[in-house]
Amino acid sequence: MINAGKHENLPVARIELDRANPRIRKFLEMYGDAITPDQVYQALGAAGDDESESSSSFEKLRNSILTNGGVILPVIVNRRADGKLVCVEGNTRVALYQSFITEKVKGDWTTIPAIVHENMTDAQIDAIRLQAHLVGTRPWDPYSKAKYLHQLRTQELMPFERIVEFSGGRRKEIVESINAFSEMEQYYRPVLPSDDAFDTRRFSGFVELQKPGIKESILSAGFGLKDFALWIHEDKFSPLNTIRSLPRILRNQKAKEAFLRQGAKEAMKLLDRPDLDKVLAEAGIGALAQALTQAIYGLPWKELQRLRAEPSCDAAQQLSEAAAALSELMTGLGNSQ
């Protein structure tokens, strides 16, 4: 149980940035043990980059604080038994205040609103991070989320059910995320020419790898996960969701050859397309959704068992692709359920 904490205006100079913060750890690891406050600040800026926008969320937050003359939400700080004040949530805001003081930015940046907890346990700190950044309004990027989940499960040995409870996520998604992180580190990092080439945006490709039938199709075609990592590095999947078609590509000799030469997008052009009759081709999306729903509810038990036993068969893969496309559509419509 986490107590409410006490609201205080803390001197910024006394607050220590959390060097163990999972969001920036991947940037700090390159510095070794001797990490300076300036390097933490630089790591926070690098971790703020939003892959879908040209400007970073780090810069947006900086401009917002300057415009408003301060932060709107208080940071969360742990006052440890030795009296040290360590920022648990809000490291970027604290770092920005510290930079404003150094740069002599106009305004009073010497104190920052904070919720102070006394001598928090590791479990309480983990709970705050999970709620704030895995399901909260300031989510970490998918790779950083997965790195943290992997750490909680494999290093801190947190019970899996507690991770699910804290993060509010679905068990299947959390398992996929942890496994994707593990395999990205195991297979993708070694094929790169240097750590500088490690692209965390490729992480979603390893999430796709966890979908039913993908790994089986790679192994059945005589390849391995190291080959998959090379394909990711060589940008064979563009966009990354074309990985969903990999089982059908690898079963088709011409498509497989085109994939190895030019990538999944070109290979998909060689796959057999369903010969839709005129009525079906012209049907509205609502009618098609209704027809698919009826077909699913009327699916014979024997066919369901076959799909379960053969997750890489064409019908199963086509259903997987349809499910992913429908999920993206619903998310775009503002309904991710």
Image (cartoon, rainbow, N blue to C red):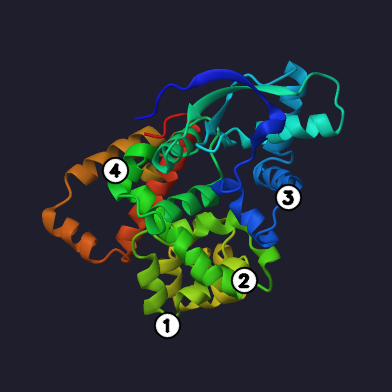
Identify the residue under disc 2: 262
Identify the residue under disc 1: 222
Under circle 1, the secondary element is loop
| Residue positioned most to the left | 301
Q: CB of mark 2 within 8 Å of CB of mark 4? A: no
Image-quadrant location for residue 34:
bottom right
Under circle 4, the secondary element is helix
Q: Amino acid at mark 3?
A: Thr
Q: Amino acid at mark 4?
A: Leu
| Residue positioned most to the bottom | 222
Residue ID at (39%, 60%):
210
Q: CB of mark 4 within 8 Å of CB of mark 1? A: no
> Which of label 2 and label 1 is nearer to you?
1
> Which label's residue is closer to the chain start, 4 or 1?
1
> Which of label 4 and label 1 is nearer to you?
1
Identify the residue under disc 4: 292
Label 2, label 3: how many angstroms apart (C-alpha)? 45 Å
> Which label's residue is closer to the chain start, 2 or 3?
3
